[in-house]
Amino acid sequence: MDARDVASAIAWQADHAANNGAPCTARVVRAQLALLSGETETGRRLANWPGIPLEDALPLRLAGGFHHLVLSGADARLGAVYRGEVTDQDAVDALIVDLTAQHDAALLPWLDGPPQTNEAGRSASIMAALLWLSPRVGPRFELNELGASAGVNTMMERYHYDLGGAEVGPGDSPMRIAPEWRGPPPVPAPVEITAIRGCDRAPVNMADPAEALRLKSYVWAEVTERLARIDASIALAGQRAPDLVQMDAGAWVDQRLAAPQDADTTRVFYHSIVWQYLPPETRARITAAITQAGEAGGRIAWIMLETNRETFRHELTVRHWPGGGEPVLLGEAHAHGAWVVWHGDG
């Protein structure tokens, strides 16, 4: 597949959605092919995308805009597609073309930035990595999330997890994270999160109804459990907002590394489906800063749930110091947390 070919990216993303339990969203994504003739400003911008469409999550940007039309009440016609009542691809294509013509000005800004796919289900992998780290670096962790978006996973210490039978977190939490677990469960270990904070270049304020609705728009419409998790996140943020700052990730990592650190606490940097959106120079800056801090004797860990751009699998990788800092592949996960394949020490 030509990485820069927009049509190939749209077709791949549609197949990916269909293969991951979202056939209705897949039809909406595939219908974007009908926009490439350039009859609308949105279609022309889509067809002439200057970057790498899949890395930029281009089809999902516009998919969020179409879902928003339904959730906001601006145009309810796609509701029949999302409910599975309209399944003919030609009919969906025609509807998407008509919706884009009528809502061109409203849809165009959805192409300006990547989707804010803030998904609580991904925190299962992060928590499993902390369980793995605990006997290696100690049980106390200060967590720092890069690309935190709305801070859904900057509240992960408030969630209850069932990780293949290994239960972690407050039992009375309204957020219940229980992915299908493939492989042995993580070995039980103490995990004490002493602090948790995050950064994002454009953080979403879940207390703002308009921003919360935008966040929900990026969720695939038929995956109702994900929508329920967003609602649970909004409720928890209403009780106590996540600790977020608006800041470039590279500059924030430097700032966090310079902050005082308790001697018995490991400073953890973590992120999920974020790395591909950062500019290459920012990735290099972060990698150098964390590596240098670890090699200089810092108690540092780096947890990544990110897409392998060759296989498109979402791999859970950990580096830690002391320990040499070599990457360890702990597992793979569904992009939205539906399942986790756990390798652990195996």
Image (spheres, rainbow, N blue to C red):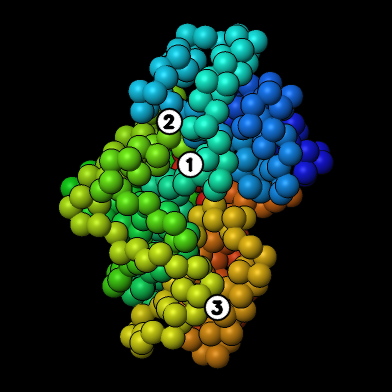
Nearer to the camera, 98 or 291:
98
Image x and y of residue 314, in percent: 59, 49
Q: Which element is circle 2 on?
A: helix
Give the x, y percent position of residue 70: 41, 23
* Residue 281 placement, left or right of 274: right
Residue 152 visible in this rendered orientation of the protein: yes
| Residue assigned mark 1 | 336
Tag 1: residue type? His
Q: Quadrant of the C terminus?
A: bottom right
Residue at 28% across / 46% down in the picture? 208
Q: What residue do we see at 36% from left, 80% from top?
A: 265
* Disc 1 crowd, CA 10 A, few/some/many (<14, 14-19, 20+): many
Give the number of the mark in front: 2 or 3: 2
From the top left corner, tell me how far across and down residue 10 is, in percent.
68, 32
Mark 1 and mark 2: Cα distance apart in space: 19 Å
Of the numbered discs 1 and 3, the one sitting upstream in the chain is 3
Q: Which mark is residue 148?
A: none
Q: Circle 2 is placed at which residue position?
A: 68
Q: Quadrant of residue 36?
A: top right
Task: State whether residue 331 appears in this view.
Answer: no
Q: Distance between the residues labelled 2 and 3?
A: 38 Å
- How packed mark 3 is, by other alpha carbons closer than 10 Å (few <14, some 14-19, many 20 or more), is many
Q: What residue type is labelled 3?
A: Ile
Query: Which residue is at a point 47% across and 46% down the rendered structure image?
Result: 116
Residue under the point 59% across and 85% down = 292
Q: Name the one closer to the observer, 110 or 186.
A: 110
Residue 173 as seen in the image, left or right of residue 253:
left
Q: Where is mark 3, residue-wise?
A: 290
Q: What element carries label 3?
A: helix
Report the amino acid beneath label 2.
Answer: His
In the displayed orientation, state which residue is furthest to the right: 2
Distance, label 1 to label 3, CA atoms, is: 27 Å
